[in-house]
Image: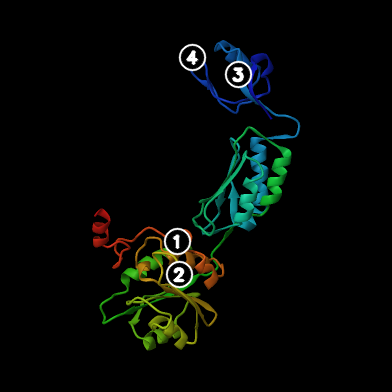
């Protein structure tokens, strides 16, 4: 592609690089392919040259290039749970058709962006929860045209890199425990129910039992639902504590305890009779994002979550502090010492 100022008598068919105001109001917008009437209007505005982009042999215009790349990233939109918006100004937005989590091949995204400086592909973080119509990615060609060879490389590198994992679990059971009868389950039921509703999962009736291994094990054995959740009145501080012990007593397995995400450290995962079990940290009573969200969302959408996946969540795992936590990261005396 050629780019730069040219005399008006050489600009017909070229792409206007910058908007130009016209006498009496109005303007010629950048990106416009200049015709004879446009050139007369520019001459009337007192211009004898104009900055343009001119395509050369083998170049692909910005809209065609953006659309071709988006179609390579999502070859089967219906199967991928995604939708391509109409192309314009070298951009195609890629949207989620329904709720779910974004499946993104980061290596392919990096490869696409390395093909040519004029090619840009931006996405949400991998496994981000999406709502219907949410933007998963945007393709933008930042010049008015692109060498066809560069576009071909990008399409090959990015083929099939994006999709949406839709929810596969439909029901859940939340079992809460109370210590000395001091805690009621209404808030936890409401907050967890709202989390699950975003992904179309129905939460069963409120279930609150005493904070003992035997009582919790009994409730787990009777629990109905595709996903079993445990929220204890006293924090789970060890893999041998009440909640993990109750899961084992009920015949289940504890697969992993703890996660390098804060808030959310005191989480555990396991299985019972082929169903996933998540032991929620106390911060799950707050609607603010915490590590349990990342785990539940993936499990609900059929993404296996193992201990290996959890221990790799540390980078980016320092989330916003929850003011209601009984032990915030910085105590008042820490602030005093910092000031001193």
Residue under circle 4?
Answer: 24
In three-dimensional space, the C-alpha distance between marks 2 and 3, rounded to whole angstroms, equals 59 Å
Q: Which residue is rendered at x = 42% and y = 83% of the image? A: 240
Residue under circle 2?
Answer: 259
> Which x, y percent locates residue 61?
67, 34
In three-dimensional space, the C-alpha distance between marks 3 and 1, rounded to whole angstroms, equals 51 Å
Q: Mark 3: give few (<14), some (14-19) or many (20+) Cα within 10 Å.
A: many
> Which x, y percent locates residue 67?
65, 42
Residue under circle 1?
Answer: 317
Q: Mark 4: give few (<14), some (14-19) or many (20+) Cα within 10 Å.
A: few
Position of 106 relative to 84 (above/below): below
Q: Nearer the viewer, residue 252 or 33?
A: 252
Which of label 2 and label 3 is nearer to you? 2
Residue under circle 3?
Answer: 50
Residue 181 appears anywhere in the view: yes
Q: How many marks?
A: 4
> Which residue is the extreme one toward the front?
340
Q: Secondary structure at mark 1?
A: loop
């Amino acid at each position: 592609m050629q780019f730069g100022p040219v005399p008006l008598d050489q600009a017909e068919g070229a792409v206007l690089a910058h908007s130009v105001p016209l006498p009496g109001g109005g303007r010629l917008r950048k990106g416009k392919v200049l015709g004879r009437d446009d050139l007369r209007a520019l001459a009337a505005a007192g211009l004898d040259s104009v900055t343009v982009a001119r395509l050369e042999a083998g170049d692909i215009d910005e809209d065609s290039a953006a659309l071709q790349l988006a179609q390579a990233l999502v070859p089967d939109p219906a199967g991928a749970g995604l939708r391509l918006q109409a192309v314009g100004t070298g951009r195609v937005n890629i949207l989620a058709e329904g709720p779910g989590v974004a499946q993104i091949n980061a290596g392919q995204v990096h490869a696409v962006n390395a093909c040519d400086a004029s090619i840009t592909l931006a996405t949400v973080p991998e496994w981000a929860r999406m709502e219907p119509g949410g933007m998963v990615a945007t393709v933008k060609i930042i010049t008015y045209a692109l060498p066809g060879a560069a576009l071909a490389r990008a399409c090959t590198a990015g083929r099939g890199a994006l999709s949406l994992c839709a929810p596969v679990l439909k029901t859940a059971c939340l079992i809460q425990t109370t210590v000395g009868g001091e805690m009621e389950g209404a808030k936890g039921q409401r907050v967890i129910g709202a989390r699950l509703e975003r992904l179309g999962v129905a939460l069963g009736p409120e279930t609150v039992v005493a904070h003992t291994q035997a009582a919790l094990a009994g409730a787990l054995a009777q629990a109905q639902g595709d996903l079993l959740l445990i929220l204890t009145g006293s924090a789970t501080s060890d893999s041998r504590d009440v909640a993990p012990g109750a899961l084992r007593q009920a015949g289940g397995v504890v697969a992993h305890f703890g996660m390098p995400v804060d808030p959310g450290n005191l989480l555990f995962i396991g299985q019972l009779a082929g169903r996933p079990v998540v032991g929620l940290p106390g911060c799950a009573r707050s609607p603010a994002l915490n590590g349990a969200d990342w785990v539940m969302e993936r499990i609900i959408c059929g993404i296996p979550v193992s201990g290996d996946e959890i221990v790799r969540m540390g980078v980016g795992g320092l989330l916003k502090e929850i003011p209601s936590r009984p032990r915030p990261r910085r105590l008042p005396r820490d602030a005093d010492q910092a000031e001193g």
